[in-house]
Amino acid sequence: MIAIEHLTRRYGAQLAVADVSFTCPAGSVTGFLGPNGAGKSTTMRVLCGLAEPTSGSATIGGRRFRDLPNPGRSVGVLLDAGAQHAGRTGREALTLSAMVQGVPAARVDAMLELVGLGGPAAGKRVGQYSLGMRQRLGLAQALLGDPQVLVLDEPANGLDPDGIYWMRGLLRGFADRGGTVLLSSHLLREVEAVADQLVVIAGGRLVAAGSKDELLAGTGTLVRARDRSALQQALSASGISTRPGDGDAVLASADPEQVGLATARAGVPLVELRPAGGAGLEELFRSLTHAGPQGADGAAATVQETRA
Amino acid sequence: MTTTLLPAPPAPTLPTLTRVELRKSRDTRAGFWLLLTLGVAALAVPLLTMFFADPRAKTFTEYLTLAQFPVSLLLPVLGILLVTSEWSQRTAMTTFALVPQRARVVVAKLLAAALLALLGVVATLVAAGLVTALTPVLTDDATSWEVTAQHVLQVVALEVLYVLVGVAFGLLLRTSPLAIVLYFVVPTIVTVLVTTIPALDWVREWLDLTTTTEPMYSGDLDGAGWARAGTATVLWFVAPLIGGWVRLQRSEIA
């Protein structure tokens, strides 16, 4: 439903998005991941017709956003919860949108109710809203036109744990009814629970894309021992490369059986041994966040290796 | 997998977008007070005239002329805010995500601004009428209801022009303080400059908005006057509008 094809966006000498391609099928939630400044927001702005691509294209249902006659009725957009007039009430902000889209006024209150801004909160000025309330208002605005596609930039920002749980349920339900969701975040944990597929970018380049299961599988083995240095010696003696994991854990680039055999041979007692699962992707993700744009190519190579 | 969108409802019409812009002009505290101030000022100036002016100045046409001054001062600010608030309050992202054909939003804003100027003139007509009716009651002076169609037409043209200049300035500069300050400062500097340098007389006569539109307050603009007001309009309205329009089409909304 959403198709990003060889999208490039340049600002002077700076390359914000470089040759990024991915698709978001109907009936699924796509988690769009990357550290701050990776090019997620630029990609989404191009998708929503707020910025022009330098080259490549971004389409929704085969059409450019700018060619949609009444885009709010097919694509719900939340790119910035702060993009509301502080002097308008929540209800007024939605009423203006409803007028533009030709949506009945009753839908305004229904959406405010849905996102938990019914009652007195609807009549308060947006300037008095917390960030979480603004996110909820933004979500109500995105859902107002009863769209088939949702494009949400960091929607969990500012939501409390209850709010995040509620939003996951809402997006899951939306996708299960056949909707398409593209949802960005700089936190893997935030989208892991709801996304069907993941797209990871760093430094403007695509570093990983695929179904969540595919990306979270085959990323090595998490192993833990009381004597960490002995464990590392045992693994390198068997030619298994390692990376540091969470806490005192070690991530070994081999399957659990090979790791178990190697440590048994060396006589190192283990405390934990299991497939790394999300830990591998998380570790990749963290390395991207720390390395910044320069590290992207190296990280991309790592992904290629681990997936090969 | 579905690859096409459901048939979408038609695009919002220009009248709809204009209604939305009119609503935006009054649904914030700043907008509401600005409109109220405008109405109050339109009434206050003829009222003060009735109490303190020369007896000969107490006619409908005179009240109408005087009421234009506060309105023509405040309307451009309204026009500026109609555009700049989209950027200062960052609502541009929402606005243009709902109407990606940016030119349509600009046209709707120009139409809404022109309608607000018409409303402003109606307010001055009502105020002038009210004060004319009150003059024989509250003072010892005689009054006159006489007014020409030419006078009314010219104040309409004047106020519409002034509010549209505000919209154009807002569109070009996009920040409220900068647009408001430049709107008031630049013409003043130009006026001072051309008044002190005799060689620049032609600039004042043809390009100074204040000078060329002055006869319109009292409905006294004549043949050559229209041409002079026209050239000033090109400089102060058409030029910034084109600049702002191009800037809007090219820029990224963030």
Image: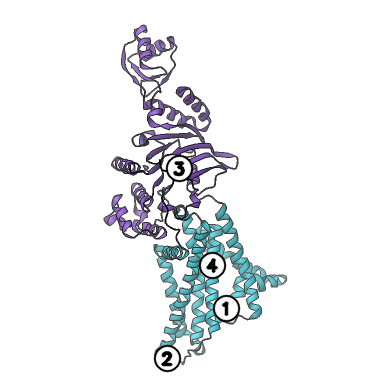
Chain colours: A purple, B cyan
CA neighbours of label 4 inside 10 A, class few (<14), some (14 to 19), many (20+): many
Label 2 – label 4 distance at C-alpha: 38 Å
In-front residue for pair B55/A250: A250
Q: Position of residue A275 (x, y in %)?
A: 35, 21
- Return the chain for callout 1: B
The amino acid type of the residue labelled 1 equals Met
Label 2 – label 1 distance at C-alpha: 28 Å
- The residue indicated by pointer 4 is B164
The amino acid type of the residue labelled 4 equals Leu
Q: Earlier in the sequence, mark 2 or mark 4?
A: 2
Q: Nearer the viewer, mark 3 or mark 1?
A: 3
Q: Are marks 2 and 1 on the same chain?
A: yes
Q: Position of residue A273 (x, y in %)?
A: 33, 17
Q: Earlier in the sequence, mark 1 or mark 4?
A: 4
In the rendered image, the residue lying farthest to the left is A119
Q: Which mark is residue B136?
A: 2
The amino acid type of the residue labelled 2 equals Pro
Indicate the secondary structure of the residue bearing disc 4. helix
Q: Nearer the viewer, mark 2 or mark 1?
A: 1
